[in-house]
């Protein structure tokens, strides 16, 4: 999951000075690291370091981190589980903020509503729904990211998308104000929620409906089986491109015979042509070059401009 607010400014290289200042302003529970390799925070396993990496331990610490970045005009980036993200090899000059602390990762249930922290794994949400016999969330089981990332991307699978389930979202603005909005007022789109580029989702209330946990489990198994058969197990960032209107980007790339095409360690997956996998030792440069090759071929042979679904950050 991810939302991004890139404010132009420069962070002192390596982040040490920024980390020291931040440490004075937040509670000791907040994790602060300098020069943090982002490859280990993304499912693609590529990308350089972030000058500053922060896991705030509370709403007030998050507010302080955001305030500090704003005061210094440091670029910031909200990182989810890194499952839809391509970080460039030079890394990120600024602060990467990850809401994976337990404070932001809770899932609680009240009747047919699930209150889900932005840092909770989407998979944990579907498992909790199943345990409480709440149906309608089965499709979430195959989405690898965090709740925050799934909101930002309006992530989807098996015909369902995140915002189909969202009743309301708690947000923090860049002024540190916390407020709540109904899901529909956030104007979600296919694979995106532009408002979450400038606002940080803290949690969301999702709604299910009563069902039998056995039937829910069965549907999850069916979906998972379908996914295992049609999608690669190797490290990837899910689908690279958005589907052009009424077309499958995967089918399109497949028809051009590009499965198996490779640049360095980046390979068009044999199982699904809209996935580029890290076949071992790939760099972000390999990924980006392969993406460009595919785009050029699709433009030349089908006159279609493929739009990226995966978010590219860094330098
Ligand atoms: N197809 C091919 N060759 C391929 C890939 C697909 O011929 O290499 C054909 C399939 O056989 C099928 C059609 O294309 O007839 C559609 O394929 P699929 O069912 O896999 O759906 P998709 O449109 O390619 C979308 C989402 C996936 C989601 C699946 C399943 C997008 C960009 N992709 O893929 O989401 O998992 O449906 O619900 O919307 C993601 O967003 O990261 C993602 C993986």
Image (tube, grey):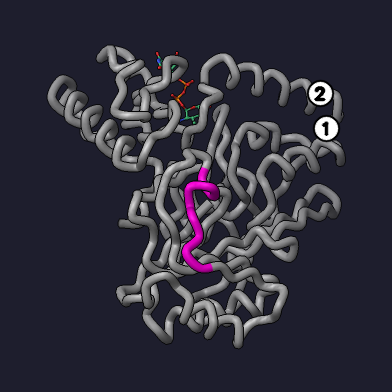
Query: Looking at the image, which is closer to me, 264 or 161?
Result: 264
Left or right side of 226 for 212: right
> Which residues are the magenta region?
34-42
| Residue, disc 1 | 211
Left or right side of 88 for 271: right
x and y percent of residue 173 in the render?
Answer: 51, 74
Left or right side of 307 for 160: right
35 part of magenta stretch: yes
Is label 1 in contact with label 2 (beta carbons under 8 Å)? yes
Q: Is residue 159 above or below residue 229?
A: below
Instruction: Name the disc covering residue 55, or none.
Output: none
- 10 Å crowding of disc 1: few (<14), some (14-19), many (20+): some
x and y percent of residue 207 in the render?
Answer: 72, 47
Query: Looking at the image, which is closer to me, 172 or 275?
Result: 275
Q: Name the residue located 59 percent from the left edge and 70 percent from the top edge.
A: 32
Q: Is residue 37 visible?
A: yes
SS under mark 2? helix
Q: Is residue 184 above or below residue 191?
A: below
Q: Name the residue located 59 percent from the left edge and 44 percent from the top edge.
A: 145
| Residue, disc 2 | 215
């Amino acid at each position: 999951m991810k939302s991004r607010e890139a404010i132009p400014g420069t962070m002192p290289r390596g982040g040490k000075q920024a980390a020291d200042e931040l440490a004075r302003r937040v509670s000791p529970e907040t994790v602060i690291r300098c020069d943090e390799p982002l490859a280990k925070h993304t499912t693609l396993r590529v990308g350089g370091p972030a000058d500053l990496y922060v896991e705030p331990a509370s709403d007030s610490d998050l507010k302080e981190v955001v305030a500090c970045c704003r005061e210094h005009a440091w670029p910031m980036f909200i990182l989810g589980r890194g499952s839809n993200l391509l970080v460039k090899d030079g890394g990120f000059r600024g602060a990467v903020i990850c809401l994976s602390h337990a404070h932001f990762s809770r899932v609680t249930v009240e009747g047919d509503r699930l209150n889900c922290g932005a840092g909770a794994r989407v998979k944990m949400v579907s498992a909790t729904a199943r345990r409480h016999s709440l149906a309608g969330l089965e499709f979430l089981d195959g989405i690898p990211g965090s709740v925050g990332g799934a909101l930002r991307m309006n992530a989807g699978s098996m015909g369902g998308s995140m915002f189909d389930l969202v009743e309301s979202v708690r947000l923090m603005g860049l002024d540190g104000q916390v407020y709540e909005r109904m899901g529909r007022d956030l104007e979600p789109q296919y694979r995106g929620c532009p408002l979450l580029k400038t606002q940080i989702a803290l949690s969301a209330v999702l709604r299910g409906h009563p069902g039998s946990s056995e039937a829910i489990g069965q549907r999850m198994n069916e979906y998972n089986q379908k996914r295992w058969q049609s999608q690669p197990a190797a490290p990837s960032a899910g689908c690279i491109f958005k589907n052009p209107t009424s077309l499958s980007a995967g089918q399109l790339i497949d028809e051009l015979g590009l499965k198996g095409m490779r640049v360095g360690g980046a390979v068009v997956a044999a199982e699904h042509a809209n996935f580029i996998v890290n076949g071992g030792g790939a760099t972000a440069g390999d990924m980006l070059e392969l993406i460009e090759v595919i785009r050029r071929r699709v433009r030349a042979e089908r006159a279609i401009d493929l739009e990226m679904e995966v978010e590219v950050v860094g330098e």
